[in-house]
Image: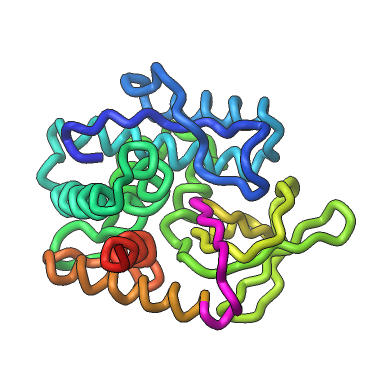
Amino acid sequence: MSPARKAAPRRPRAAAAPIPSVPEDASGLGDVPPPLVYERTAAAAGDEGFDAATAAVFAAVAAVDVFCVAETGGRVRHRLGSLVHAADLAEHALEDVGAGEEEFTHLFAPRLPFDVLLGETGRLTAADLFLERWGDELPKDAVRAVKALVRAEDTAARATWSGKSATILDLATGRALPGPALLRRGTRPFVCRLVRLGNAFFPLAVERIVNRVTDEELLAEVRGAALLGRDVLKAAGLRLRSTKKGFGLGARILAAAER
């Protein structure tokens, strides 16, 4: 998402981990108009067995990411300056822990365009600019998914099942939330971007948690990382839509500090 970054959108793999995450790189979409990126990514996700709503969220992430890559080299580059700056900070944080392009695409493509506010005032994000430019050419499901991603925040969660129906337990609130129509099974707590689309909640950009003794410890770590991420961005002159959108960057910086 920096000017030099040409990250392609990602496609889901049928044999991937049990909780859906951002789809894996699909080559050849970097120069495709965002509405067509959305259409192709949604179709690919459907072919891989994801339900339509989950596919719409995946495809919205991919389309907005392609839009941001194109626009940082185009006429509205100055309007996306805050996003480019935040992406650079994220990239440096990943480099500090030995991570690279794949981790950037998984961790930050589903976050920064929907989180970072552009300019010193107002509530505009890169996703809002995307809708201004392409909203009239997108299907209604795509517009709904982009707006849902703008609202979505990070939380600690756990997925449970009753038969084939999945429930997402938000550990921060204790609320049991209806999951998507198709959710791959997993038992450990996880940190995710929790996206509400219609009556269901979709865990996106999932980070699985291992070696955590209690849910309380996990929640404390999530809160600490979110505050740190917010403060790091604030020190750089950047603003987020909410504190709970600071987890991704903060978690990377915490990881670097612990090395």
Q: Is residue 33 left or right of residue 10?
A: left
| Residue at image point 32% right, 76% down | 227
Quadrant including the N terminus: top left
Q: Residue furthest top?
A: 28
Question: Total label count?
Answer: 0
Q: Residue furthest right?
A: 163
| Residue at image point 43% right, 44% down | 106
Instruction: Report if residue 128 is visible in the image.
Output: no
Q: Position of residue 45 (x, y in %)?
A: 61, 31
Q: Residue furthest front?
A: 259
Q: Position of residue 202 (x, y in %)?
A: 61, 55
Q: Which residues are magenta?
A: 205-217
Q: Position of residue 211 (x, y in %)?
A: 56, 67
Instruction: Report if residue 45 is visible in the image.
Output: yes
Locate residue 251: give its quadrant: bottom left
> Looking at the picture, does residue 259 appear above or below residue 225?
above
Quadrant including the C terminus: bottom left
Locate residue 199: give its quadrant: bottom right
Residue 116 belongs to magenta span: no
| Residue at image point 85% right, 52% down | 164
What colouring method underlies this structural image?
A: rainbow
| Residue at image point 18% right, 47% down | 84
> Looking at the picture, does residue 52 appear above or below residue 224?
above
Q: Is residue 243 left or right of residue 93?
A: right
130 or 102, nearer to the observer: 102
Q: Position of residue 153 (x, y in %)?
A: 46, 65
